[in-house]
Image: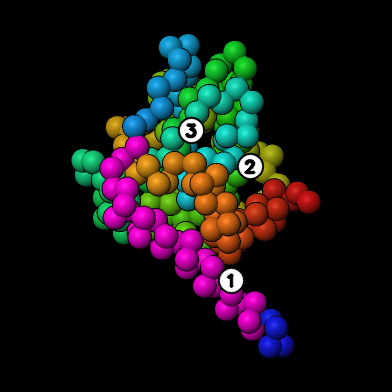
Amino acid sequence: MMCMIFKGIFWRLALLTALFAPALAQAQTAQPAAPAKPAASAAVATFGGGCFWCVEEAFDKVPGVISTTSGYMGGHTKNPTYPQVSAGNTGHNEVVQVAYDPAKVSYAQLLDTFWRNIDPTQANGQFCDHGSQYRSEIFYHNDDQRKAAEASKAKLLKDKPFSGDIKTLITRAAEFYAAEEYHQDYYKKNPVRYTYYKTGCGRAARLKEVWKTQ
């Protein structure tokens, strides 16, 4: 019994450390990162799926993805900062902008990756992160992406392995603001803190439950 109590305390402290580490780090690196400059032949897609650290990791694993950049989109404040966005004061969503090679991976495949890494039934948040700044959202950059996103959502509604409505939004892309440098590739730079956060947030466990995977 005491072991369980200590484990619970440990995970709560670890999660708090991971959550508040960016706020402490911003004093050292407050400048936004420079967005990656993909090749002229690259295409761009933008997705909001909760914590952008986790969304970056998911898309970085996809063959054909050239780069991922964490940032903010969909709000009403110019040059938002992480504290402003995370407080829910700017209307922005935490997003990841994906530069990809259409000859190696299609937008439809990126949509599939997106769906499989979110809980589509959760409104105004993802997993342990609550608030509109963590909403699941597909930002389309052209009419072809809009049609593909709508078709993908319609197919999922028909064949979904989970119960409940799909809350994911499909929205025209707005100005993208790259997040602060310390957020970029966070899962690579801070693997221990990242693992504590992701595990404590219950992301992997909930994804298995939603998508009926092992």
In magenta stretch: residue 163: no
Alpha carbons under labels 2 and 3: distance apart: 17 Å
Q: Which residue is mark 1?
A: 11
Q: Badge 3: how crowded within 10 Å, few (<14), some, or many (20+)?
A: many
Q: Do callouts 2 and 1 mark residues in contact (Cβ within 8 Å)?
A: no
Nearer to me, 44 or 38? 38
Image coordinates of residue 21 in percent, x first then y, are 42, 60
Q: Does the image show residue 184?
A: yes
Indicate left or right for 125 with 121 as reference: left
Q: Which residue is mark 3?
A: 68
**Mark 3 element type:** strand
Sequence order check, earlier mark of 1 and 3: 1
Alpha carbons under labels 1 and 3: distance apart: 29 Å
Magenta residues span: 5-33
Q: Which residue is mark 2?
A: 116
Q: Badge 2: how crowded within 10 Å, few (<14), some, or many (20+)?
A: some
Q: Do callouts 1 and 3 mark residues in contact (Cβ within 8 Å)?
A: no
Image coordinates of residue 34 in percent, x first then y, are 34, 32
Instruction: Name which residue lies at 43% across and 12% down.
Output: 40
Query: Which of the two marks, 2 or 3, is nearer to us in this view?
Result: 3
Q: Quadrant of residue 156?
A: top right
Image coordinates of residue 6 in percent, x first then y, are 63, 82
**Mark 2 element type:** helix
Q: At label 3, which amino acid type do we have? A: Thr
